[in-house]
Amino acid sequence: MSAEEPGAAPPPEAAGELEPRPVAEAPSTAGPQPAGPDGMDGPAGPSPAASPPEQAAGGRDPAPSERAGGYREQMDQLRPLDEGTTGERSHSSDTSWRDGGTEDPTTGDTLPSSLRPGQTVQGVQVNGNNALINIARADGRQVSVLRSLRTPEGVRETAHTYVEVADFPQTVVRLQDHHVVLLHGGAGTGRRTTAEMLLWRVAGIDKVAGIEPTHTDVTAAELAGEENLLLRGHGTVLELPGRATVGAGTLRTLERLARDRKAYVVILQDSAEAPGPSLAPYAVGHVPPSPQDVLRRHLLRALTRQGRCAADCDPCRGACRMAFVERCVQQETVVDELAAHPRPAQTVELATALAGWTGVEAELTAALAGLRRSRRDFAAKLLKAGKAARSGEGEEDPQAAPRRQAFQIAYAAFDGHPLADVFDAGELLLAIFQAVESGAERVTRVVFDGGVEQMLRWGPEEGPLAAADIVEQPRRARLVDPRLLTDVLDVTWNDFDGARLPLLLWLEQLVFTRRDAVRQRAAYLAGWLATCDFDEVWSAVVRRWAGDGRGTVRQAAAWALHIAAGDTRLLGRIRGRVRDWVRSGNALLHDTAARAYGTRIGLLAPEEALRELRTLASRDDLNASASVARSLVTLYHPAEAYLADTPGAPEATWRALVDWHRDDLHRLRVHSARGLTLLARRRGPSPREGWPLLLAGTPDFTPDATELVALWQGALTDGSTAYQAWNVLHAWIRLADDDAELAERVVALVSRMLVGPVAVRGRFYLRHRWTTSPTARRLAGMRWGEPAAGDSPPHPTPDPGGHP
């Protein structure tokens, strides 16, 4: 299997890591340790007491047909679990130390754009300037809100497409006078955009913030009582959850808070009804602008960004774009669309579709097929038509129709995957559907079934589900529109009531597979379904996976929560349940919680994540697991593709590593050493991608050299990390051979490390194992423990025991 296939582990470069070259190792000075399953010093996996899941011969997971009971019995097990169940420790081995192993979150496919959690379901787009604000309730419970800053570039881009609503100037004056405005109107009418434009006018383009509750039951009164809610001198858009109401007393409290902080607040209320007279000083009704005007602004802006000439002008000065826009607005199909779907949010999507229209009348229908409602209609017709046999086309096989339906769902779900994955997943889904409908769990294989194209259309005159053939090896599933992935899932979940449990069982069986990319995609799909019905998906699969004896399945639970947390309405509930896992008596849930903090859940609240990881690291049931260390690495610098949109917290994470290293509790020092070892494998950002991240630094933080020396010494002498740490140090030295500037930094650092016990083993490597490296030879000839030229010493005098 090639490294490019999703089922294969990527090369170290793909994971943003520095790969040490294999070397022969000398015995550790820390003494012999029991060997772990991956050749690592020390045991691996959560500390044990329960038997691992049964495996089939050859060490593989049992095939679905080999498992005890049928699919119908397995669906009966997809029921809510008792959250208070006390779990036992697991004997199953933890392979999280394995380079590119099956528990490495950096393996597998990248997150599909249609599932990317940076695109929140409602409210502010999360960027690097975000914070979670915790609010303690009178009953002792805690709720939180997500506060984010809009970038000036984002606000300016919004202004290019904004159509000013009626009474906008008067609303600006009211906001300046009262510091608080209650903007009420229906969802999707452009209230947030208007609010941001108001705040730009009164606070400034670089001082526009947004606040969204992460709990659906948080009240405006609770928010008004939080002193740290508003940023000084900033304007804030506050979106109330659901049908929440606000009283005059709460508005006066917010006004006092805003005046004290020289801030401004626009509250968005989902109500088209005019509020009572007591709210009159603050209330403003939001009447959306003309949909034709919204379409004109957005379409013109889209064409301008494309630099498109609509009339082959020479030279093009842009006048042709306005003529093209007016032509679009007058199209009968467009007029009908605007009449049926007049809200700004729907009009913006129409403008995006029209921006891709060539101007040829016959191609307008195809251009509008990308609209969300059109895509969903297409998916619904596809799946419903797939249930019936095509007798007119001579289709006689009674299994052809259900096979086609299962294949269509699998093809959409595994967009971008090799067709081998699609075929396997489709066959599994067909077997589950047959078990539900007839009790038959054996699938009759057909050698020739009409081909992929035949199974991906629902009528001879309809458009295709798959894109045109792309020359690639191996051939992969390619949807004509990647957004169809979630549309097909949406239709399957919401339009076919009998498909929910079979769909969840299908995802669970896929998670149990040994193919990393399939497992990861199945976990993503479960997370997306959780945004449709959180409680059902949580009870049926996510909570079960979190308590599974296999680390790969627990990692799938963390991935699913990562996707679900992209919906800010669920973020508070998810954070609360992960905290409950930390405080439970279940060792497996502890491990899953540690993994979850290495996802979006931890990155949105890094200080909380670090506190909870310290609690987990202080216990003995994760002594032999690297899940805590891997989450620390992600919090420091999320290099994984599926976290690319979420920034890390390098300084806070580094302080945690240093504090743990200095702690009296040995377990914390071990987890610190593991974190350093894994972090040392990461590459630096451009233009120093050939440097280790810890030396290149991030844009905002570079570790202190003295602290880095101390953590390296801990990793090089700890029995559970020494083998890996010396390998990574060798990689640093080899990198220094090709970069003179890096060589000076490495020599200065390593010469300070090699004191006391570290020098004993270091002498062996430098003189007998790494002799082909010029940097190693240079170090071998130095007096260790003393700084290189120009470097300040870490101690008043070097340790004589470290000299060669």
Image (spheres, helix red, strand yellow):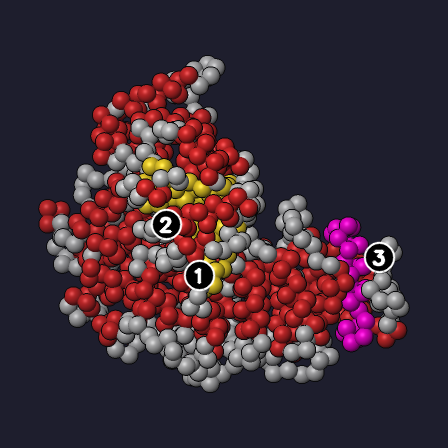
Which residue lies under the disc numbered 2?
247
Instruction: Tell me which numbered mark, 1 or 3, is placed earlier along the sequence.
Output: 1
Residue at x 28%, y 74% (from the top left corner): 77
The kind of secondary structure element at disc 2 is loop
Which residue lies under the disc numbered 3?
791
Where does residue 8 sit, x and y in percent of width and height?
A: 47, 60
User: In this picture, which residue range is highlighted in magenta?
Assistant: 738-761
Identified by mark 1, the residue type is Val
Where does residue 403 sit, x and y in percent of width and height?
A: 22, 57
Left or right, residue 39 beside residue 164: right
> Residues under labels 1 and 2: Cα distance?
20 Å
Instruction: Tell me which numbered mark, 2 or 3, is placed earlier along the sequence.
Output: 2
Between circles 1 and 3, the one closer to the viewer is 1
Left or right, residue 751 beside residue 366: right
> Residues under labels 2 and 3: Cα distance?
63 Å
Residue at x 30%, y 65% (from the top left corner): 536
Residue placed most toward the observer, 311 or 205: 205
- The answer to whether the residue labelled 1 contacts the one labelled 2, judged by CB atoms less than 8 Å apart, is no
Split into 4 quadrants, where in the image is the C terminus?
bottom right
Residue at the far left in the pictured view: 392
Q: Which mark is residue 143?
A: 1
Identified by mark 3, the residue type is Asp
Magenta stretch: includes residue 751? yes
The kind of secondary structure element at disc 1 is strand
Residue at x 51%, y 74% (from the top left corner): 94
> Residues under labels 1 and 3: Cα distance?
49 Å
